Image (cartoon, helix red, strand yellow):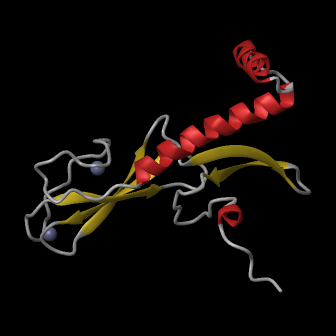
């Protein structure tokens, strides 16, 4: 188990400040970091499409300009963003819709430092094969994966 010195120093600072044990301080620091990343991921996903192409796209300007439509020659606008991979947490998919007709298309983009979740390497069963499994941040909508820990925020279960 190797841990870099910088991280240990941060944990020790927190232990000194809060009186927490090493493990508790480490866990709380990780939770804070996850929370920041979770908030960022929600911001990447949660915005309303612009009403006009004259204003910057509310996604934060990280998309491509919409293409001109082949059918009606209006422009496409960026309307939606969602995770675009089940293993690469920095891959997002951008959906564009034509402002003049039902035409649409999707572009896959890579947003460095803006993950929608955490990728973990897990060893799987009999063959002891290492696979990458992604954990979706709570609050992020993934078309193929479900966010963890939704039960925590929900009301009591319906089990009887
Ligand atoms: Zn955009
Ligand atoms: Zn069109």
Q: Is residue 72 above or below residue 78?
A: below
Q: Which residue: 74% across, 77% down?
A: 157
| Looking at the image, residue 29 lies above or below residue 63 | above
The quarter of the rendered structure image containing the C terminus is: bottom right
In-front residue for pair 112/126: 112
Q: Position of residue 46 (x, y in %)?
A: 40, 55
Name the outermost residue toward the right.
126
Which quarter of the figure has residue 3?
A: top right
| Numbered-mark total | 0
Whether residue 17 sits left or right of residue 84 in the image: it is: right
Give x and y (percent) for residue 106. Answer: 34, 60
The structure residue drawn at horizontal position 82% and vertical position 21%, both measured from the top left corner, is: 2
In the rendered image, the quadrant that contains the N terminus is top right
Residue in front for this viewpoint, 132 or 15? 15
> Residue 118 at x, y = what percent?
64, 45
Does residue 135 appear left or right of residue 157 in this picture?
Answer: left
Which residue is rendered at x = 14% and y = 63% of the image? 69
Q: Nearer the viewer, residue 93 or 60?
A: 60
> Residue at point 48% right, 55% down?
84
Q: Farthest residue in the front direction?
A: 18
């Amino acid at each position: 188990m190797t841990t870099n010195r910088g991280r240990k120093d941060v944990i020790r600072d927190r232990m000194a400040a809060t009186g927490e044990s090493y493990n508790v301080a480490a866990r709380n620091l990780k939770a804070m970091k996850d929370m920041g990343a979770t908030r960022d991921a929600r911001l990447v996903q949660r915005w309303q499409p612009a009403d006009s192409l004259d204003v910057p796209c509310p996604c934060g300007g990280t998309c491509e300009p919409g293409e001109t439509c082949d059918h009606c020659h209006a422009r496409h606008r960026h309307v939606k963003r969602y995770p675009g991979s089940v293993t690469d947490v920095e891959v997002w998919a951008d959906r564009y819709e034509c402002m003049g007709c039902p035409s649409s298309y999707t572009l896959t983009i890579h947003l460095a430092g803006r993950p929608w979740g955490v990728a973990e390497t897990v060893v799987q069963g009999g063959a002891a094969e290492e696979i990458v499994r992604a954990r979706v941040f709570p609050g992020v909508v993934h078309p193929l994966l479900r966010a963890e820990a939704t039960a925590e925020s929900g009301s009591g279960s319906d089990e009887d």
